[in-house]
């Protein structure tokens, strides 16, 4: 089971074996949701960052915005995922 907790106004963190929300977001956008990767980087010590843009429409509104995923890896497994967004209020409003 995964856990969720907001660390600050612009990020959410998942820990455990639960999945992310992309399947649900695809459903809510009638299949228009896309996460377009822009940049991959690592520190070589277990942190990987993927900068990406959300794209899609929901109820005729553009719900796209820039985001980043921060993965923490231990023992070859992802143990934490932090999903950051450029505007958490807009994200929450778009997906409520």
Image: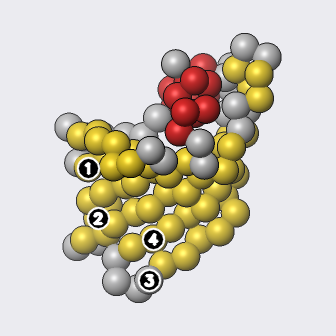
Question: Crowding near pointer 3: few (<14 within 10 Å), some, many (20+)?
Answer: few
Q: Give the Cα distance between marks 3 and 1.
A: 20 Å
**Image mark for residue 77:** 2
N-term mark: 2 or 3: 3
Pointer 1 residue: 15
Question: Residue 22 versus residue 69: which sits nearer the camera?
Answer: 69
Q: Give the Cα distance between marks 1 and 4.
A: 15 Å
* Residue 75 placement: quadrant: bottom left
Pointer 4 residue: 48
N-term mark: 2 or 4: 4
Residue 32: where, in percent of width, then height?
Answer: 73, 29
- Element at label 1: strand
Question: Residue 41 versus residue 17: which sits nearer the camera?
Answer: 41
Tag in front: 2 or 3: 3
Residue 65: where, in percent of width, then height?
Answer: 68, 43
Above/below status of 49 relative to 35: below
**Image mark for residue 43:** 3
N-term mark: 3 or 4: 3
- Element at label 2: strand
């Amino acid at each position: 089971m995964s856990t969720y907790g907001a660390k600050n106004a612009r990020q959410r963190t998942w820990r455990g074996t639960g999945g992310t929300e992309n399947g649900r977001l695809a459903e809510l956008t009638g299949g228009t949701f896309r996460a377009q990767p822009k940049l991959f980087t690592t520190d070589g010590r277990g942190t990987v960052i993927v900068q990406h843009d959300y794209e899609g429409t929901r109820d005729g509104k553009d719900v796209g915005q820039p985001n980043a995923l921060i993965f923490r890896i231990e023992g070859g497994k992802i143990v934490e995922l932090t999903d950051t967004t450029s505007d958490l209020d807009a994200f929450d409003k778009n997906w409520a």
